[in-house]
Image (spheres, rainbow, N blue to C red):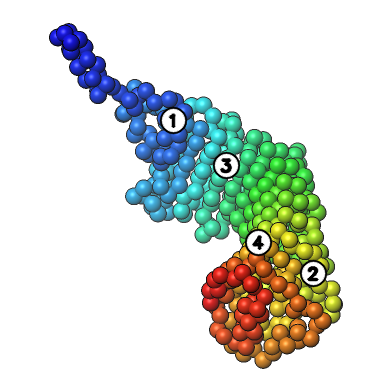
Amino acid sequence: MTEDSNYCCSNKFVRSLTSDRISNLPSNVIENILMCLPIRDAARTSILSKTWWHKWVDVPQVVFDDTFLGNSQGLIQGSTSTELLMKTVYEVLLLHFGPIHKFILSISGLKSCPEIDRWILFLSKKDIRDFNLQISSEDHRRHKLPSYLFSCLKLRYLKLRSCIFKPPPSFKGFSKLISLEFREVHFDADFLKDFFTNCPLLEKLVLDRCVEISCLEINAPNLKLLHYNGVYECIYFKNAPRLAELSVYQTPGAELDNETRNHSSLIEVFSSLPALEYLSVDYYFLEDLAVPDSSVMLQASLTNLKFLEINDLCYAEVEEVSCALCLIRSSPNLQKLLITVFCSRNVSTNPFLQLSERDGFLDFSLNQLQEVKLQRFIGTLPEMEFVRLLLAKSSALKVMHI
């Protein structure tokens, strides 16, 4: 090998070591890297090279959360810090070029303010598809959403906390919406009925401590997950053939009078849910299943149910226990059972003695049940009877947590 060839090889090797690999990354890789960084750090990448210069302002995602605040977290309570935050958000949005598909504003202590409406107006012109606004629940002033939000017809994910959601009369719904999460959101109780019809792609619905709903009617053919925590009189599943995960809880201290509750609609609820795999309910739900002075019991077979959770089960109430057993015996493919016991040391009755007198009521098997968790267990006679029943009926049981 000649001296010139040795020089060329050495020069190529040096150039390969000193090449700017970070500048030669594909644009989509750079974008994915920037989307994983907080805004503050993403902006700092501008010093890496000319390729990265202000690349962060093109990323279609803007996130303002506690990570964005860094060491200043919790300081937005003061007026000076709040003004600084508002100014910073303005600057980031004004510097941003191109579409903003995802926007998150979720900072601890964030209160309702007029600036939020201006940001929503800005986002309505940026092709927004994922909008997340979390007003602090400590702020009793819920933020009334401006009409600009209802012009964002490409929304696929909508997540709100402590807001007032009041669409204009001309609003026809979000036809592309996939996920909706409302926490402490005020809206017209009759709004949901038409809203589901206008959101045919909806797959996830979370309603947590929102408004008092006389009857929650679910007409969502693609709905897969429903979590409801609040006040209700009845829940009617008009059309939910794909619903696989259901959680229903009554807000503590907000129980309705027994006369206003609709028992019959809940008794037939499971016949409308053929795809149900996960069910989590509380004692209030069981009380609705237990129709007073009626021998009507759960008739539907929950053949796909694999996980069942019952909260605050009171062993002193015969009808509650009977309904819990109805859910269990109607789930032949149940794999995991979690029960939280309502602590009551003065249990004077043993419901299992009464239930054993019903012809065939305790004749069932749980051949797929593998795990049982019993929480707040104190060892009363009915609790021990329940454990004995589960051990006798569950041939495949592997673990029991008490």
Disc 2 and disc 3: Cα gap in Å? 40 Å
Disc ID at residue 298: 2
Q: Which residue is mark 4?
A: 306
* Foreground of the two, 154 or 292: 292
Considering the image in quadrants, where does the N terminus appear?
A: top left
Specify which label sits upstream in the sequence, 2 or 3. Answer: 3
Foreground mark, 4 or 2, reads 4
Q: Hey, what amino acid is under mark 3?
A: Phe
The residue that appears at 47% across and 41% down in the rendered structure is 63
| Secondary-structure class at tag 3 | strand
Q: Which residue is mark 3?
A: 131
Position of 299 with respect to 152 (left or right) is right
Disc 3 and disc 4: Cα gap in Å? 33 Å
Q: Measured from the top left, where is residue 300 in percent x and y? A: 79, 64
| Secondary-structure class at tag 2 | loop
| Secondary-structure class at tag 4 | loop
Disc 4 and disc 1: Cα gap in Å? 40 Å
Does the CB distance between marks 3 and 4 fall below 8 Å? no
Q: Hey, what amino acid is under mark 1?
A: Val
Position of 5 with respect to 293 (left or right) is left
- Residue 45 sits in quarter: top left
Specify which label sits upstream in the sequence, 3 or 4. Answer: 3
